[in-house]
Image: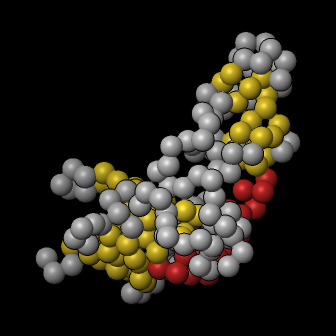
Amino acid sequence: SAGDWFCNHCCAFNKEKAWSCQRCLKGKVPSRKIAAEPIRKKVHRCMSCLERHPKYSARCTRCEGAMEYICDFCGAFGRTGDGTVEKVKKEWYCWGCWEKFRQHNRAMANELPSAWFIKDGQVWNWFGVDGRKFRLEFDRRGTLLCDLGSGHWRATSALEMSISFGKPLAETYQLKRSGKGFDAYRDGV
């Protein structure tokens, strides 16, 4: 929820009231928290003509000059060679943030059943029969991040998962892995 934050050292999720990371005890509250107003507008800049680009571009669309990029996670500045572009969202991340993602991904491979582990991230799209569309993300230690409010996940078998999320009233579902993603069944229904 708004004000919560991710550790800049281990990427663990922390509640707003925490002053240091509750998992690694090394990370501190970042300047940018969840749902916080951006500190600066993310704009990549051409190093030759200074043209500003709101979206990633390998070269300047005006003069073909080299670009200076802004990491979409930590906000660090960099150039080609200092990071790379994420393939799905087409956003640029510095190598330091890519390494944090790799560490997080390795930890998730140890926590999730193999049928649920996705190599490039644990974000799933939910398309409900009731018309609702939102995202779920399986995080470490059973934490579930969801557009409708955070919650918890627990593997009940190699192919099944129990999840709960949402505020003020938590919704609980059983998920069963399928060839196209997963099927969801409301608990008690």
Q: In which quarter of the image is residue 92?
A: top right
Nearest to the observer: residue 14 or residue 164: 14
Position above or below: 26 against 2: below
Q: Residue at x 58, y 64 (%)?
A: 6
Q: Position of residue 2 (x, y in %)?
A: 43, 57
For the N terminus, which image quadrant? bottom left
Q: Quadrant of residue 53?
A: top right
Q: Which residue lies furthest to the left in this view?
A: 189
Q: In which quarter of the image is residue 169?
A: bottom left
Can see residue 104?
no
Q: Where is residue 16 in the image (x, y as percent from the top left)?
A: 49, 66
Q: Where is residue 47 in the image (x, y as percent from the top left)?
A: 83, 23
Q: Which residue lies furthest to the bottom in this view?
A: 156
Using residue 132 as the reference point, say whether residue 23 is left or right of it. Answer: right
Can see residue 80?
yes
Q: Residue at x 69, y 45 (%)?
A: 75
Using residue 137 as the reference point, say whether residue 45 is left or right of it. Answer: right
Using residue 135 as the reference point, say whether residue 96 is left or right of it. Answer: right
Nearest to the observer: residue 117 or residue 111: 111
Q: Residue at x 59, y 71 (%)?
A: 19
Q: Which residue is drawn at 86% across and 42% down?
A: 81
Position above or below: 100 against 112: above
For the C terminus, which image quadrant? bottom left
Q: Position of residue 135 (x, y in %)?
A: 40, 56
The tally of labels here is 0
